[in-house]
Amino acid sequence: MREIKKPAKPIVSKEATLQLKLWDELKGKLKGKFSTLKESDLQFELGKKEEMFKKVQTKLGKTKEEFASIVATL
């Protein structure tokens, strides 16, 4: 009988795990402050932070600087 191998779990670095944890906290604060933001607006993908931030700032009608200031105060 042939053995079926399970797919390997992706290796996630400690840094990536920390980024995801911090993002979950920030995401909750952003959703609390801006009720127009949906979960799909705040999907974090490693390496695509700038794209996601641009999408959110556009949806909120904020400049990059305004959005950075908001994030810094949360």
Image (spheres, helix red, strand yellow):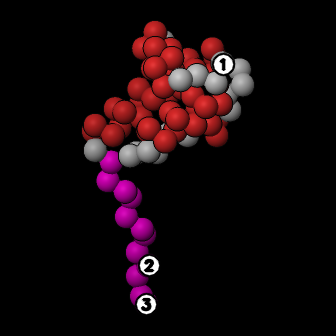
Q: In this view, does 18 lie above or below 12?
A: above
User: Which secondary structure type mostly characterizes the magenta part of the structure?
Assistant: loop
How packed is label 1: few (under 14 Cα within 10 Å), some, or many (20 or more)? few
> Earlier along the polypeptide chain: callout 3 or callout 1?
3
Q: Name the residue under label 2.
A: 4
Q: Residue furthest bottom?
A: 1
Query: Does residue 11 belong to the magenta stretch?
Result: yes
Asked if the residue under mark 1 is in contact with the one under mark 3, i.e. CB atoms within 8 Å, the reply is: no
Seen from the viewer's position, the closer of residues 41 and 16 is 41
| Labels 2, 3: front one | 2
Identified at 62% across, 36% down, the residue is 41
Q: Give the residue type that dot 3 points to.
A: Met
Q: Mark 1 points at which residue?
A: 34
**What range of the chain is rendered magenta?**
1-12
Q: In terms of image quadrants, where is residue 27?
A: top right
Q: Mark 3 points at which residue?
A: 1
Seen from the viewer's position, the closer of residues 21 and 37 is 37
Q: How far apart are marks 2 and 1 (CA)?
A: 47 Å
Q: Work out which quarter of the rendered image holds the N terminus and state it.
A: bottom left
Q: Which mark is residue 67?
A: none
> Earlier along the polypeptide chain: callout 2 or callout 1?
2
